[in-house]
Structures are given as C-alpha cells and as structure tokens.
Amino acid sequence: MSSLDDIIDIYKRDVDRTLVDASLARTVEERIRAPEDFEAFLEELRAQVAGRRDTIR
Amino acid sequence: MSCCGALSVAGVDYILVGGVAAAAHGSVRATQDVDIVYRREPENLKRLVNALGALQPYLRGAPPGLPFRFDTETLAQGLNFTLTTSLGWIALLGEIAGGGKFEDLAPHALTVEVFGVKCLILDLPSLIQTKRAMGRAKDLEAVAELEVIRERMQRS
C-alpha cells in the first residue's frame, strides 16, 4: 500500500454509490449524454441568472 | 462528443481517455472536455487535420491573434494540444502518463458505438492506471470512483 492508496481509500468513502449504481444501469450512450445534458442545463441556468442580475441593476 | 463524431467520420485513429471515457464506464463526475490519444503516424495526422480543421481549432487559454496553424507540421512538431473548437474543448494527446502512446493503449481499448459512430474507449483498469499516474488530487478522486465502479461490476 502506498500513500496514494491510503488517499484513494479516504476518497472512496465519499463516493455516492447510489449515483454510481444509477449510472451503471444506463447504456454507454446515455452515460456520455448525461453530463452533456447537465452542461446544457447549466448554460441555460447561467444565462437566466445573468439576465436576472441585469434586471436587478 | 461531437468532436469524436468528426474524428470517427474522418477515419482518425484515436482512443477516448479521461473524463468522457470515465463517464462511459459509469462515472458521474462532470467533465467539460474530450481527451483523446491519437496515433502519430503521418497519414493519421492528415486525417486529424481534415477532421478538426474546419472547427476553428485554437490553443485553449492562449491570447487571440497568435499565428497558430492547425496543420500536420504543427502536430508533428508538438505532442499534446489542448484546443478550443466550435464543437467544444478537446485535448489531443500524443501520449499520456501511465499509458503511453496510441499503440501502447490500443490493446487495452474497447470498441463502442455511440451516437452512430464507432470509437475506441480505454478500458477501466487502464483508465484507472492513467489517472493514478497523473497523481493530482482530482485524479485520485476520480480513481476512487472508478475503483468503486470496478468493484460494483465485479460483484454483478
């Protein structure tokens, strides 16, 4: 065991197994598309928030 | 992923590594760029230029206006390029820590068909090996998740 293994073991405690299991239930294509869809959602959200900021000013 | 479509249609020899490969194996960690290891053989460099040349490739993070030319000569003289394109960020890697060149990685790659195109994705054990070799905190976090995925898959 190296110190890297010790660090990885600590990080493993925080891995959300429910999210991993949900991801493993998807197809490869769905797994790749999921972060892309999330990024598109974030882009839309950022645009909406930026618009609200302009309104507040 | 659209960059990969362009690469596959142009017949480029490449292997998906990094965050997108991790996502394909089940990772839920966010990634914003596509990392590929490309074969550095002259004909493949031509195909790479043909595939990405029309997508306004430019050095990511560089100030605008630099005389960057995305051609086979530039690719041959460099090794790893992190680029912006009209289809998103892509890192073209001639080799990676813990994995080596395309030829070293090819025996450890899986062929998958996504979005109508076939592409090679680095297998899970090799992906873990490359992430460990990178050794940054974010890579070790990624290794932790990938090892959990490997344990889950071995159990099922």
Image (cartoon, rainbow, N blue to C red):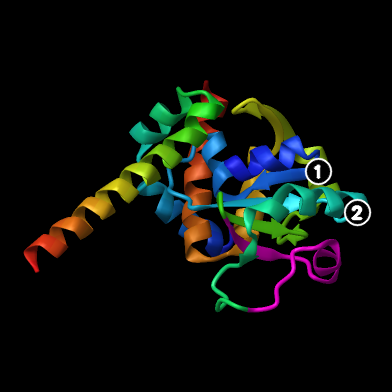
Q: Is residue B83 visible?
A: yes
Q: Secondary structure at mark 2?
A: loop
Amino acid type at mark 2: Glu
Q: Nearer the viewer, residue B41 or B27?
A: B41
Q: Is residue B27 above or below residue B48?
A: above
Residue pointed to by mark 2: B41
Residue at 79 percent of width and 43 percent of height? B12
Whichever of callouts 1 and 2 sits on the residue coming sooner in the sequence is 1
Q: Is residue B104 above or below residue A26?
A: below
Q: Secondary structure at mark 1?
A: loop
Quadrant housing the N terminus of chain B: top right
Quarter holding residue A23: top left
Q: Residue A37's x, y, as percent?
A: 40, 38
Q: How far apart are the alpha carbons under marks 1 and 2?
A: 9 Å
- The disc placed on residue B13 is 1
Q: What chain does badge 1 belong to?
A: B
Q: Are marks 1 and 2 in contact (CB under 8 Å)?
A: yes
Q: Residue A1's x, y, as percent?
A: 58, 57
Q: Residue B3's x, y, as percent?
A: 63, 45
Q: Is residue A6 visible?
A: no
Quarter holding residue B107: top right
Q: Nearer the viewer, residue A7 or B33?
A: B33
Task: Say if the magenta span includes residue A49.
Answer: no
Q: Is residue B138 left or right of residue B53?
A: left
Chain part drawn in magenta: B66-85
Q: Nearer the viewer, residue A7 or B96?
A: B96
Q: Is residue B116 left or right of residue A36?
A: right
